[in-house]
Amino acid sequence: MRALKVIGCAAVAAVLAMSALTGCSKGEQTVSTDGSTSMEKVIGFLSEAYMEKHEDVKVTYNPTGSGSGIKAVESGSCDIGLASRNLKDEEKANLNETVVAIDGIVIVVNSENPVADLTVEQIAKLYTGEVTNWKDVGGSDAPVVCIGREAASGTRDGFESITDTKEKCKYNQELTSTGDVIQTVSSNPNAIGYASLASVGDTVKTVSVEGVTPTNGTILNGEYKIQRNFVLVTKKGAELKGAAKDFFDFCLSKDGATYIEKAGAVPVAK
């Protein structure tokens, strides 16, 4: 597979501008995406699959976070924004949202942590500081270290909305990417974090929530309670054209759904 090339939207704009002036010898088209770091694996699988079938198209991805991706679309500096949350009412005035997949927000702890299951209420109490020792939720006698995302993160917005902890969380660390959260939890035996199901590997331990393990099936049927939408964001009044429109349609197709599943998320395409 061709490797997914990460290029900032500003760099993409510069390349396109140069191409317009000098001409592109190979006729290559560029589709720029920008936003959610939680969607990195999903957009990676979709982009690689699409580029294999369209050798004259390059799909780029700038992992800036949901809030920045939404702003990039609004400013016109990229074709498609990626958000791991639904748009807010004020954002919908100028932007369209299209749900491409459903993702579970997985609660992760260090592999050495004996805790295997938590309720939504317990998770909320851990993050708001009402519970500060793991022994109070069935773990070892050790302080709880809460790891989360930065304020603009769609993952954080989803997590805090579902657990009813908005503006109440007491984070020990606020990190700028899903990968950083997983890495930090994997290196601290007392840490707890949250991350996209599509991004979690075997370096951390996934905790079930109220007896339900996060899987494609339990997310799709709603049994797993901590879940949110993966959204493609486009600008109103500026319809996608050419390769950008074709890639957008591919993401929502049955063929695209196959790659979304491979990336660990639940596609909405039937």
Image: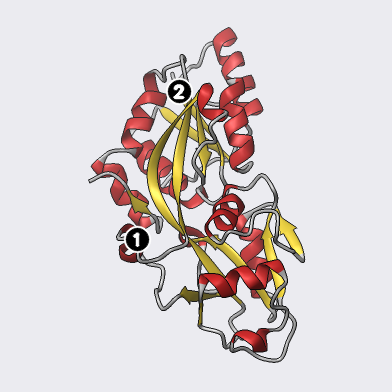
Quadrant hosting residue 113: bottom right
Q: CA distance from mark 1 to mark 2?
A: 39 Å
Could you tell me the amino acid type at mark 2? Gln
Residue type indicated by callout 1: Gly
Question: Is 126 left, or right, of 61 in this rendering?
Answer: right
The label number, if any, that marks residue 72 in the structure image: none
Q: Secondary structure at mark 2?
A: strand
Q: Quadrant of residue 166?
A: bottom right
On screen, 55 above or below 144? above
User: Which residue, as the protein is rendered here, is positioned at the far bottom?
Assistant: 141
Looking at the image, is mark 1 or mark 2 nearer the viewer? 1
Task: Name which residue lies at 35% across and 66% down.
Answer: 223
Q: Position of residue 147 (x, y in %)?
A: 69, 65
Disc assigned to residue 222: 1
View extreme (top): residue: 21
Question: Can residue 195 be seen by looking at this rendering?
Answer: yes
Of callouts 1 and 2, which one flags the residue occurring earlier in the amino acid sequence?
Answer: 2
The quarter holding residue 16 reads top right
- SS assignment at label 1: loop
Q: Can residue 77 be seen from the camera position used here?
A: no
**130 w.r.t. 150: above or below:** below
What percent of the width, then of the height, locates residue 197? Answer: 47, 62
- Residue situated in front as seen by the camera: 125 or 229: 125
Q: Residues within 10 Å of mark 1 (few under 14, many from 20)?
A: few
Front in this rendered view, residue 26 or 181? 181
Whole-percent x, y for residue 120 in the image: 52, 70
Residue drawn where x is 47% and y is 19% of the image: 236
Of residues 33 and 190, the one nearer the viewer is 190
The residue depicted at 65 percent of the width and 63 percent of the height is 181
Q: Position of residue 204 (x, y in %)?
A: 57, 74
Instruction: Using the image, tell me which numbered label, if any, was put on residue 29.
Output: 2
Count of marks overlaid on the render: 2
